[in-house]
Amino acid sequence: MNSPHSEILKCKFCGNEKENELILAEEKQLGMGDKFEYFVCSNCQCIQIKKVPEDLGKYYPANYYSYQEPTFPSRLNWLNFFIKKSLILYYLGYLNLTGFLTSFVFDHPFPWLRKKEVKLDSKILDIGTGAGRKILSLQRSGFNNITGIDPFLEKDIKADGGLKILKRDLYEIHEKFDFIMLHHSLEHMPDQEEAIRHIGTILNDNGRVLIRIPVANTFAWKKYRENWIGLDAPRHLYIHSVKSLGILTERTDLEIEEVVFDSGTYQFTGSEKYLRNLPLSTSDDIFSKEEMKKFEKDALDLNKKNDGDQACFYLKKRAR
Ligand SMILES: [Zn+2]
């Protein structure tokens, strides 16, 4: 219900103006405490910032976690890495004895990387790669054609052995790729429709796009609201529901092929810290073993019910 002094809040994606709820969200990750107006669309449930701040840069300080130079793998964790690499190869369908044996104990290190979408020689683009930790790990696992881009890097980090980590804006990229991934970067973009349109132009016809994002209208949002870790004001500008991302992609050449929920314990541990007014850096030791087990179980159960607080959206070109 619109109160007499309320202004019109129009959903950027479905256009709905009725009964959109205004909320006040605080910057909590860095503990800056600045407050931002968001609203929740009553039709498509997308949670959106009312006005994108002009000084967004100040909420991404130089030591923001994704920009730390990768130093992986160090000597200490090479065994760890060897096992990880073997598991990735095994789960992608390559013959790998270590991977086969360790698969009885360990899950796929990157479950979003599936053999039906990628091979070792697939041409891969990672948009919003930060310092490229994830793609460095993929390159060391045998992928030989990976590019990561991030406009906020200070400079290009490296370009060798089939891996490029470049300071580039998405719109500067015009060559085509087989697999384009966005790991928790779409929600940071002010121009999502334009971004997805452009991605459609640089995707090979049989290629796939993977978009991993926090998902609105799910259990953790309903339980924690302004303390939900997925809100992350003001960095997360538009947080989609499955419905609102569908509405957005309908206007582009891409369509959603499959949605796989992949939320974890963080939806509880992170949100609980905010709820209890603790800094995000607080150790998880504040939770008992039983609590942590319950968080793990609840996350798995929520994922099965498509109600976890984050998901992988696999997109393909729309059939014409
Ligand atoms: Zn809407």
Image (cartoon, grey):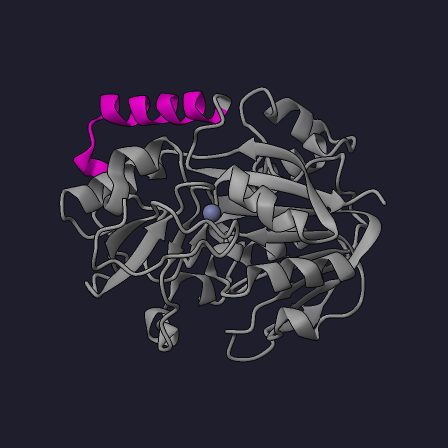
Question: Is 32 covered by the magenta stretch?
Answer: no
Image coordinates for residue 259, horizontal then vertical, percent: 60, 34
Q: Is residue 204 left or right of residue 42?
A: right
Query: Compared to 124, does 294 lie above or below?
Result: above
Query: Compared to 1, does 181 lie above or below?
Result: below
Visible residue check, residue 142: no
Seen from the viewer's position, the closer of residues 77 and 212 is 212
Quadrant hosting residue 191:
bottom right
Q: Is residue 100 left or right of residue 2?
A: right
Q: Residue furthest front?
A: 4
Visible residue check, residue 224: yes
- Which residues, given as a range, are shown in magenta? 284-303
Image coordinates for residue 143, horizontal then vertical, percent: 74, 51
Q: Is residue 113 left or right of residue 8?
A: right
Image coordinates for residue 57, horizontal then vertical, percent: 39, 75
Q: Residue furthest bottom?
A: 155
Residue at the image position 43 percent from the left and 31 percent from the top: 308
